[in-house]
């Protein structure tokens, strides 16, 4: 129990010591100003700014209001990184991210609960 507590406290401490996200990474537009909900143009993103290879390279896509989009791919193909880029959590090297309206994100977190009903 002590070891688990120590691990949890270390995770919380490392989270609290992270730098704040840059609010200017994503350009936000008011409601009704465009038919585009999300747009990434020539997006290059890297979790490690000193790496020669970006995490995601040359991303171009556009989502219109009312569209339903599924992000599919194999393990390690960059699905979670793409969503993190849209949220502004992965540093942008080059390109633009545009948002119109608001956004909400619900992370996929598997959980198992043992018990009986």
Image: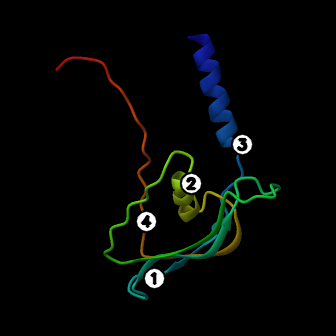
Structural distance between the alpha carbons of marks 1 and 3 = 32 Å
Is 78 situated above or below 4? Answer: below
Residue 92 spot, x, y in % from top left: 69, 66
Structural distance between the alpha carbons of marks 4 and 1 = 12 Å
According to the picture, the residue beneath numbered tag 1 turns out to be: 30
Per the image, label 2 sits on a secondary structure element best described as loop
Quick one: quadrant of the N terminus?
A: top right
Mark with earlier residue (2, 1): 1
Mark with earlier residue (2, 4): 2
Q: Are marks 4 and 1 in contact (CB under 8 Å)?
A: no
For this rendering, which residue is in front, 20 or 96? 96
Quick one: quadrant of the C terminus?
A: top left
Q: Which residue is depicted at the point 64% across and 32% down? A: 11
Residue 3 spot, x, y in % from top left: 63, 14
Relative side of 83 to 20, left or right: left
According to the picture, the residue beneath numbered tag 4 turns out to be: 103
Structural distance between the alpha carbons of marks 3 and 4 = 26 Å
Q: What kind of colouring is applied to the model shown?
A: rainbow
Q: Which residue is depicted at the point 57% across and 55% down? A: 81
Structural distance between the alpha carbons of marks 2 and 1 = 29 Å
Q: Quadrant of residue 40?
A: bottom right
According to the picture, the residue beneath numbered tag 3 turns out to be: 17
- Badge 2: residue crowd in 10 Å (few <14, some 14–19, many ≥20): some
Mark with earlier residue (3, 4): 3
For this rendering, which residue is in front, 78 or 36? 78
Q: Which residue is depicted at the point 45% across and 82% down? A: 30
Q: Nearer the viewer, mark 2 or mark 1?
A: 2
According to the picture, the residue beneath numbered tag 2 turns out to be: 78
Is 65 situated above or below 49? Answer: below
């Amino acid at each position: 129990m002590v070891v688990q507590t120590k691990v949890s406290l270390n995770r919380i401490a490392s989270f609290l010591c992270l730098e704040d996200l840059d609010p200017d990474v994503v350009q936000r537009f008011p409601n009704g100003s465009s038919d585009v909900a999300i747009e990434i143009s020539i997006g290059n993103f890297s979790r490690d700014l000193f790496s020669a290879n970006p995490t995601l390279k040359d991303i171009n896509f556009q989502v219109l209001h009312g569209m339903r989009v599924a992000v599919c791919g194999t393990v390690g193909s960059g699905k979670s990184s793409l969503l993190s880029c849209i949220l502004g959590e992965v540093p942008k090297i080059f390109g633009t991210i545009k948002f119109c309206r608001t956004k909400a994100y619900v992370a996929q977190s598997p959980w198992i609960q043992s018990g009986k009903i």
